[in-house]
Amino acid sequence: MPMNTRGYAAQSATTPVAPHNFERRDPRPDDVVVDILYCGVCHSDIHQARNEWHNSLFPMVPGHEIIGRVSAVGADVDKFKVGDMVGVGCMVDSCQHCSSCAQGLEQYCLEGATWTYNGTDRRDGLPTFGGYSERIVVSDKFVVTISDKLDPKSAAPLLCAGITTWSPLRHWKIGKGSKVAVIGLGGLGHMGLKFAKALDADVTLFTRSPGKEDEARRLGADHVVLSTDPQQMKAVAGQFEFILDTVPNPHDLNPYLLTLALDGVHCIVGQLQPLDPPVSAGAVISGRRTVTGSAIGGIAETQEMLDFCAEHGISSDVEMIDIQDINHAYERMLKSDVRYRFVIDLASLRKAA
Amino acid sequence: MPMNTRGYAAQSATTPVAPHNFERRDPRPDDVVVDILYCGVCHSDIHQARNEWHNSLFPMVPGHEIIGRVSAVGADVDKFKVGDMVGVGCMVDSCQHCSSCAQGLEQYCLEGATWTYNGTDRRDGLPTFGGYSERIVVSDKFVVTISDKLDPKSAAPLLCAGITTWSPLRHWKIGKGSKVAVIGLGGLGHMGLKFAKALDADVTLFTRSPGKEDEARRLGADHVVLSTDPQQMKAVAGQFEFILDTVPNPHDLNPYLLTLALDGVHCIVGQLQPLDPPVSAGAVISGRRTVTGSAIGGIAETQEMLDFCAEHGISSDVEMIDIQDINHAYERMLKSDVRYRFVIDLASLRKAA
């Protein structure tokens, strides 16, 4: 008999996220049952709760930056035991046999990964529900270990904001002395600064807002460039080997492309819309520059990132909220009024019961 | 006293290319004087003779696919001697000390390479004149050797169309079994097919015109895909590790991006205009795909390419013309009515004298 679980769900694209009862499956032999303690709030939660990507399934329980404790395990699970602190990110399953999965890059599963919410379970065909909830039931292959060196509250955003910025920095071999720039200082951007600095890069923040210098430096930036100032942009022409572009909305890439060195890479992690205004082929050709993108990260590299964070004392800067404040938090996020990630304390859901 | 030389020049953006007398400098100590035998006709000759890139200097002698014999050398030249068969491509000089030049990538010279025509000599400040001419005088560092195994007529287009397609195939490490697609079957595209095949790749031609199958296979394609047929495009979704895009005009990259495998690369070599319609960030992110570009190639890799061609019996498919037919050739090129490169026999210039 499935477990009845309380959570917060969007009922439609126009209904705010509100209390909801729904069922979680009984654990299968490879499942881990996680009692959720904390869940980060990602910008994509808003997009999906509001059906801005036109693929929303309702009712929808958002949330894919999940930290909790194991409360039960299936018969075949030996990697986790009751009481373990664990994390669940954006995926809960994948085909496990395609060339992407074979490389540990389940996010690029050729059959399509199963997303933590607004997805469809590939075994029972039922909708998946995310972390704004008491509990989640997930195959052990998609559960990661949270070191006791990490504060579980501020570790939550590592499951999406963290891995989304970590994976491209590693893929493009950023290391000692690499000249890296990060565009945008939000949930992703502030993690980009921390990781690039921890990887010993020389780190620049591009920002459109003056007055962020001190914050940027605290988070790891060596330099801050006001991207709206043509003089400052000109001064860094041809400088960077890698730009991590965390801006969630369409924007002009061309001024940034000119700041890339020969063979430089502009990597998009924040937006899914078309690159409008159009990218200049001349800017790309004239320096053999690359425009690329990156989607979250695989499970193995998520664990690698979490272990790196534990070792280097890295976590997200978070602002804790109660689940009852989620709709207000969405409004503040749309005004960039958060430093730098909201995290829901799910104790508030239990208290309300 | 400078040498008086005859050539064919455009006098303005609207005046066709016509006979002209102009001066060539006396050889400097590092100069090689080349009596031009053959010169390929590149699409960019048309753009520049017609000032379509809005940077033309008139009078202009186009031509940067130059083959000729050394007729004199400066005092310090020991790499070439009178009588040698040599080539000159798109560049005649560069700063020689920046990080790009230090890597042998003079085309990305941080101070700007000196172009073979429509450029300005970096020592005397005078305009540079290209290969629709009796003679050219070039620093020995920018002269390459043409093996006697190569037919000099069909070698001419290797100096631009050849190196432009060779360089990205090598940079992106195309080799045995690589799944490569070439978009467009013109001067560049037909060389792309030949090189990709000679590098042991599995080669596909994307074309918008049916009926090119036999030609494409003759030139090295293993497969031909009609890019206007959605069924054929769907059948190759996620297939290619590298696409060489030789199309000279703006076109929609998005259908091609979906044919790239994980980490696949779409490399633009044919157009300088903005990428309109805009590239989908979703297509890039969802497969960690890359859009990049490449400009001609360095002098060392041009020599490497020429030596590879000599060894593997590769050259361009050419149609010989007299210099007097150049304007008609331009008109035919605009209708894609050439297989696959016009080459001017400069004997026609001497005969006319």
Image (spheres, coloured by chain):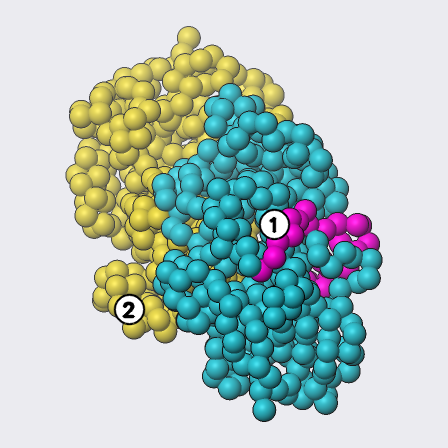
Chain colours: A yellow, B cyan
- Left or right of B116, for residue A327: left
Quarter occupied by the C terminus of chain A: top left
Of helix, strand and loop, which one carries label 1? strand
Q: Return the x and y of residue B65 as percentages of the image width and height.
A: 62, 61
Is there one chain holding both mark 2 and mark 1? no
Chain containing the residue with disc 2: A
The residue beneath circle 2 is A230
Q: Return the x and y of residue A98 as percentages of the image width and height.
A: 61, 27
Chain containing the residue with disc 1: B
Quarter occupied by the N terminus of chain A: top left
Please tell me how many numbered marks the rendered image carries.
2
- Left or right of A211, for residue A116: right
- Residue A255 drawn above or below residue A8: below
Of helix, strand and loop, which one carries label 2? helix
Q: Which residues are magenta?
A: B298-323
Q: Return the x and y of residue A230 as percentages of the image width and height.
A: 28, 68
Q: Quadrant of residue A101?
A: top right
Choose between A83 and A222: the one closer to the eye: A222
Instruction: Residue type at mark 1: give it.
Output: Arg
Q: Residue at x 53, y 73 (%)?
A: B129
Mark 2 nearby-residue class (10 Å; few <14, some 14–19, many ≥20)? few
**Label number found at residue B341:** 1
